[in-house]
Amino acid sequence: MIKVGINGYGTIGKRVADAVSLQDDMEVAGVTKTKPDFEAENAIKKGYRLYSAISERLEVFEEKGLKVEGTLGELLERCDVVVDCSPGGYGAKNKEIYERYGVKAVFQGGEKKNIAPVSFVASCNYEKAVGADFIRVVSCNTTGMSRLIRIVTSLVDIGRVRATVVRRAVDPKDDRKGPINAITPNPVSLPSHHGVDVQSVMPDVDIVTTAVKVPTTLMHLHSMNFDLKGDMREQDLIEVLRNDARMMLIHSEDGFTSTARIIEYAREVRDRGDIWENCVWEDSISVYGGELYLFQAIHQEAIVVPENVDAIRALMGFEDGDASIEKTNRTLGL
Ligand code: NAD
């Protein structure tokens, strides 16, 4: 049994904890919080051992009457792997602590790529991560684009990939920043970092991206364009996407006319309304003059969760990436 600690029980951390607890080869050794809020209370109700991420704040939990097992250091003593789900940039500081305790770590996409030797998307480069001490699971947008590029390249050689990322402003729970009453080029100076980040997973892909932020919290949307170096029929891509568990083909005729409709569907059929797959509009898939165009939507809070589970197996030396992906998919119900 792989003992997994989750450092930072926020948007990503709580989802990773639940996904880990579904695996028969892993268990959640404990989760950390910085504050004794409702999320800390929920973690205890779910049966997770709660630890204080910051040692000086241990008594704040006790004052609130919340049972904490100890500090981050005590959690690390009980772990084989820690999944760092702290806010972007904090992972780099936490890495020193993980090194001191000799614990392998999975970092998230908010960290710089040099935090780990491997920037990871399971279907693209699982084998590179086997046995590593540190892995960075890339961001939601990079995960979504990398998965899709890998699938298209399994059918046909590609040249340039160009993509526009229409970004949700903040996550639904964020009450500090709020949606914006604007369409914000983000960044204004081009290109955006997303394409560069895809190259941290697949260095040979010629990709350039631009990004704008829009006043929504639900999902990101990618407008993707591929230069094809050979023939590929739209139907061939549709078949492959239909058979890939981490892809969800949707159609506007079925009512999927927007990201709002996708989330509404997921709220009916999934715990928390989480969508771990890329949602690709089947009716957007078009090949014109040697180029492929399509739209996909990405549920930013959920898409990296399966990759985190596979990253844990890779760190622990489990060599069969396809078997890991299949197991993760099955346990999540994909
Ligand atoms: P979040 O703010 O929802 O959660 C972070 C949690 O970490 C909070 O519970 C916070 O209290 C806790 N924390 C604060 N300081 C800490 C510290 N020093 N040590 C440990 N924990 C600490 O953030 P999130 O959205 O879950 O993001 C976590 C990481 O995942 C970031 O790198 C982010 O870029 C990445 N990511 C986020 C999304 C997304 O859309 N939310 C998608 C993909 C990747």
Image: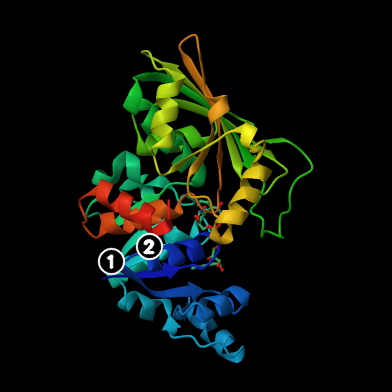
In the rendered view, how is the structure colored?
A: rainbow
Residue at 45% across, 73% down: 31
Give left or right: position of 172 versus 316.
right
In the rendered structure, find residue 273 and report the number of the disc placed on it. none
Res. 95 mark: 2
Amino acid type of disc 1? Asp
Q: Residue furthest front?
A: 254
Question: 61 above or below 244?
Answer: below
Q: Residues within 10 Å of mark 1 (few under 14, many from 20)?
A: few
Who's the residue at 42% across and 68% down the image? 6
- Asked if 160 appears above or below 85 in the picture, the reply is above
Judge by depth and name the residue closer to the eye, 283 or 62. Answer: 283
- Viewer can see residue 127: yes
Callout 1 touching callout 2 (CB < 8 Å): no
Left or right, 163 with reference to 69: right
Q: Residue at x 40, y 50 (%)?
A: 137
Label 2's element?
Answer: helix
Q: Position of residue 318 (x, y in %)?
A: 22, 56
Type of amino acid at the residue the image marks with label 2? Lys
- In the image: residue 194, left or right of residue 104: right
Q: Position of residue 290 (x, y in %)?
A: 45, 11
Q: CA distance from mark 1 to mark 2?
A: 25 Å
Mark linked to residue 25: 1
Q: Position of residue 226 (x, y in %)?
A: 46, 21
| Element at label 1 | loop
Rate crowding at label 2 as few (under 14), some (14 to 19) or many (20 or more) other CA atoms within 10 Å.
Answer: many
